[in-house]
Amino acid sequence: MNQQRAIIVTGVSRGLGFDLLDLLVEAGARPIALGRRVDRRHKVAVASKACVFVAADLSVLPSLDQIDLASALPQTADEIVLISNAGVVEPIGTVGAIDGASLAAAFALNAVAPAIVARKLLAAADSRQAKLRVLNISTGAARRALPGLAAYCASKAAAAMIFDCLAAERPDVAIEHIDPGVLDTDMQNTLRSADDQALPVRQLFAGFESEAKLRLPRDVAREILARAGLP
Ligand SMILES: NC(=O)c1ccc[n+]([C@@H]2O[C@H](COP(=O)([O-])OP(=O)(O)OC[C@H]3O[C@@H](n4cnc5c(N)ncnc54)[C@H](OP(=O)(O)O)[C@@H]3O)[C@@H](O)[C@H]2O)c1
């Protein structure tokens, strides 16, 4: 019997998510893109049914329950793979300076939305007697306290713990945490362009660029998929 795998990628308009989606489309995996928008190239892929786009602002938590992810998944899927990639590095600022609303917004996108999306996919997997597998795109910052990045560090750490709790509750759900390293994306640009007072470790991020340590998201996306055996 042929295995049917449904792959969902979040945050696909640019950066690592763009390349993950692009490589999956190229490989004929018919991925499901979940995010606010897709690049022009992937609009064409959606029109030709090479991928499915489910529009969602993942930071607007009350709207997430309304998203119909289940109908985007093939009824016959026996494995559902979530690549939880969408993320935000802001607000940048020391704990004494960041406001509660922007701190909550970072937690909404980086930690709560991945949990809600995983919960919806778990329900869809259970109703199909399919397996759920989650690739959590994490970061070294989830394990390292960086001055000025409390919102990012803490919300990414929270996401990892939520997924670990899910794995403890449901040993049949496979959870993998992936640290992609430092990537040449908008996120790194935001970090090295930050104010030194808001981000006391700004030089660390400036150094990644000046020392040519940033990796191309396409290369990293290719490695992530190959290591995960996807598609
Ligand atoms: N860059 C690095 O060096 C680095 C290092 C370690 C880990 N990571 C992790 O890798 C992942 C990807 O990072 P990246 O560098 O590719 O980031 P990026 O270039 O800033 O792209 C972020 C992606 O997330 C999406 N997103 C942001 N807010 C959203 C929202 N409210 N709803 C739906 N989608 C939203 C963006 O879509 P819009 O265009 O709609 O905003 C975009 O597609 C993140 O989880 C990050 O924590 C990155």
Image (cartoon, grey):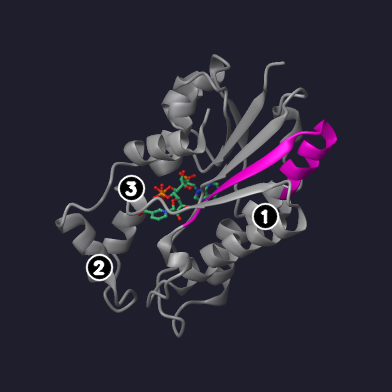
Q: Which residue is mark 1?
A: 115
From this view, report whether residue 97 is shown above or below residue 54: below
Residue drawn where x is 45% and y is 38% of the image = 227
Q: Quadrant of residue 139?
A: bottom left
The numbered mark, 3 or 2, whose residue comes first in the sequence reads 3
Q: Which residue is mark 2?
A: 204
In this view, the mark in front (1 or 3): 1
What's under tag 1, amino acid-wise?
Answer: Ala
Residue drawn where x is 39% and y is 43% of the image = 15
Image location (x, y in percent) of residue 11: 51, 43
Distance between the alpha carbons at the discs numbered 3 and 2: 16 Å
Taking the view exactly as shown, the residue that stands out farthest to the left is: 210
Image location (x, y in percent) of residue 8: 60, 36
Taking the view exactly as shown, the residue that stands out farthest to the right is: 127
Residue 76 visible to the viewer: yes
Foreground residue, 17 or 40?
A: 17
| Label 3, residues with CA under 10 Å away: few <14, some 14-19, many ≥20 | some
Cβ at disc 3 under 8 Å from ligand 1: yes
Foreground residue, 162 or 155?
A: 162
Image location (x, y in percent) of residue 130: 76, 34
Q: Which residue is mark 3?
A: 185
Foreground residue, 141 or 229?
A: 229
The numbered mark, 2 or 1, whose residue comes first in the sequence reads 1
> Is 109 colored magenta in this rendering?
no
Which range of residues does the magenta coloring cover?
119-138
What's under tag 2, amino acid-wise?
Answer: Leu
Judge left or right: residue 143 versus residue 175: left
The numbered mark, 1 or 3, whose residue comes first in the sequence reads 1
Residue drawn where x is 41% and y is 80% of the image = 94
